[in-house]
Image (cartoon, grey):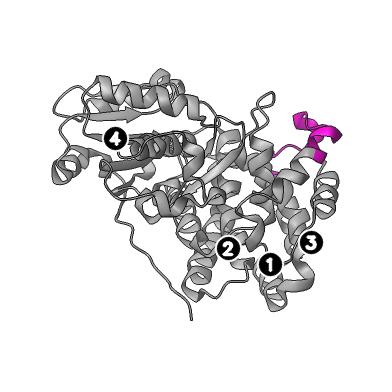
Amino acid sequence: MSTITYLTRIEFGEGQISRLQEFLDGLGVKRPLIATDKGLVATGLAARVSALLREKPMVFDGTPANPTEEAVLAAHAAYMAGDCDGIIGLGGGSALDLAKGVRLLTGHDGPLAQYTLVAGGISRIHGRICPMIAIPTTSGTGSEVGRAAVIITAEGRKLGIISPHMLPSIALCDPELTYGLPPGLTAATGMDAMSHCLETYMASAFNPPADAIAMDGLTRGWRSLRAAVSDGKNKVARNDMMMCALEGAMAFQKGLGAVHALTHPLGAIRSLNLHHGTLNAILMPTVLRFNRSVIGGKWEALEKFFGDAPDRAIATLNQDIGIPSGLASLGVTEAMMVQVAEEALKDHCHATNPRPATAADYLAMLRESA
């Protein structure tokens, strides 16, 4: 017996950002906090979104590349100081996850660690929290339709806070907001989205709708990521990539796996501040090979889909779009790998990898991906 749930409200399409005030009115939000980052303030996009609102909103632009509990607390302080009654997450996965963290604190006391999945936090999270609109400006994490906020807690661990209550009230997905995204960021976020589709498809849980959604997302990403990287204004490619990201996150309710079990602790290395999507891309070929012996016909299905062995196909795609060659090129050392391999065993994605992995297995994967 399986419980299969898809409950997210999505407003998707070019120009949908113009309806932002309408959506806020529908949620009863009069004083939103916009949680974003300094990059989007510098480009003017945050101001463009603010100008769509009836009244000038409170803006928090201190989202770090990997969101931290410290930043969540600072944003929550801004929310309280502005007497806000709702939140808009504007940006990539980091800004959206930070916004989710702030939203959680509108109805729960800290610290955040008590709400993480590995600490049994799902039972502590309730729905008495403020409304939230998630507006992605990259096509990667799919956090706009995800139940999770992945935050580096005060203890220094990058952990998932997961609950159906964490789903944004509205996912406002406008591909126009991604036009002109730089090639490197397009590549890294796009591989994040594709890794979600691949890991979900490989996961062993019974969820045929998730498999179907994952494969549609993979189809869109495979046919469009190269084009999106080479031409940032390719409308068809940008539309495909935003849908790939959205579908990857809708599908990964089924579960992820070893890629994410490793990239979460890698992303928690504060001295490196590594991009999650880049890490996913580098590790994906190795994890595909590790899982080959247990995924059976799915390996053959992926081989037919790609027209090549899945691990080779992804490695070639990585090379074509300029993904770094390996972990060592990002500054990951042997000592870091040893620590990450142990931390991966504690990650919530570890349990849903189709082939059980030990710390030694994880260390071997990291070394192979160096």
Chain-order first, disc 2 or disc 3: 2
In the picture of the structure, the residue carrying the numbered disc 1 is 354
The quadrant in which the C terminus is found is top right
> How busy is the neighbourhood of tag 4: few (under 14 within 10 Å), some, or many (20 plus)?
many
Q: State how far apart marks 1 and 3 are (Cα).
A: 10 Å
Q: Of helix, strand and loop, which one carries label 3?
A: helix
Q: Which of marks 2 and 4 is in front?
A: 4
Chain-order first, disc 1 or disc 3: 3
Within the magenta stretch, is there residue 326?
yes
- Residue kind at label 2, given as amino acid type: Thr
Q: State how far apart marks 1 and 2 are (Cα).
A: 10 Å
Q: Which of 52 and 128 is in front in this view?
A: 128
- Compared across the picture, whether 240 is left or right of 367 comes to left
| Numbered range of the magenta stretch | 318-338
Tell me: residue 310, above or below residue 160: below
| Mark drawn on residue 200 | 2
Q: Of helix, strand and loop, which one carries label 1?
A: loop
Tell me: residue 309, above or below residue 248: below
x and y percent of residue 133 in the render?
A: 29, 42
- Compared across the picture, whether 315 is left or right of 31 comes to right
The residue positioned 35% from the left and 35% from the top of the image is: 105
| Mark drawn on residue 87 | 4
Q: Of helix, strand and loop, which one carries label 2?
A: helix
| Mark drawn on residue 290 | 3
